[in-house]
Image (cartoon, rainbow, N blue to C red):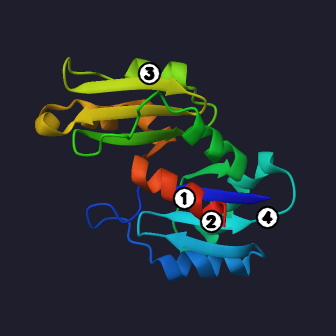
């Protein structure tokens, strides 16, 4: 089975630095196959056998041991990521000059219904839609500084989220399909 591990909060603003080569080495040492990383924000594509249910926590334990610090992993199978892209709201991500479009990936047991309660929207700037295991979030580019997306950072729910741009999300799917 093919997966993407989305690591939360690494290499952001010069904090929690982790080299992608370290991530690849850790995954390979743990026996995962076809390990690849994509950009510096902690996206690891790999193949694994066994039950998906325990894989996320196994990865967190392995990375904590290998890298010496706790990391939050949000795991999606190839099919789950395909569904995230396929089930996006109509037109989502299709106007990159007009909107900054992001996918907020949710770590179970956080649901999109509960996460949406933590999302503040500014009329005329922000738009958000719940999905299965995600929130789709678009911000009007010309009023980006007025967006309330950053307010989600101060919520308890934020600890169970990781955010990827729409471009990164679709690129990860493309890489999984190779």
Q: In the figure, is residue 121 to the left or right of 3?
A: left
- Assign a secondary structure to mark 4: loop
Quarter residue 11 falls in: bottom left
Question: Disc 2 marks which residue?
Answer: 45
- Visible in this render: residue 107? no
* Disc ID at residue 116: 3
Q: Mark 4 or mark 3, which has the lower sequence index?
A: 4
Question: Disc 1 marks which residue?
Answer: 172
Is the C-beta separation of discs 4 and 3 under 8 Å?
A: no
Q: CA distance from mark 1 to mark 4?
A: 17 Å
Tell me where residue 35 appears, x and y as whole percent: 66, 74
| Residue drawn at the location 62% of the way across and 58% of the way down | 4
In this view, 68 is above or below 89: below
- Which mark's residue is nearer the viewer, 1 or 4? 1
Q: Mark 3 or mark 2, which has the lower sequence index?
A: 2
Q: Mark 2 or mark 1, which has the lower sequence index?
A: 2
Is the C-beta separation of discs 3 and 2 under 8 Å?
A: no
Question: Disc 4 marks which residue?
Answer: 48
């Amino acid at each position: 089975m093919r997966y993407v591990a989305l690591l939360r909060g690494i290499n952001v603003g010069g904090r929690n630095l982790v080299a992608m080569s370290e991530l690849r080495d850790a995954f390979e040492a743990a026996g995962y196959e076809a390990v690849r990383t994509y950009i510096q924000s902690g996206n690891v594509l790999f193949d694994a056998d066994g039950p998906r249910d325990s894989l996320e926590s196994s990865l967190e334990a392995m990375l904590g041991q290998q890298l010496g610090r706790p990391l939050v992993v949000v795991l999606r199978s190839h099919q789950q990521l395909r569904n995230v892209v396929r089930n996006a709201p109509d037109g989502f991500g299709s106007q990159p000059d007009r909107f900054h479009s992001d996918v907020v990936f949710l770590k179970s047991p956080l649901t999109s219904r509960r996460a949406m309660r933590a999302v503040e929207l500014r009329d005329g700037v922000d738009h958000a839609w719940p999905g299965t295991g995600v929130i789709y979030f678009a911000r009007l580019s010309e009023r980006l500084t007025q967006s309330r997306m950053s307010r989600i950072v101060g919520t308890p729910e934020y600890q169970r989220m990781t955010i990827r741009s729409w471009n990164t999300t679709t690129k990860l799917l493309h890489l999984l399909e190779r």
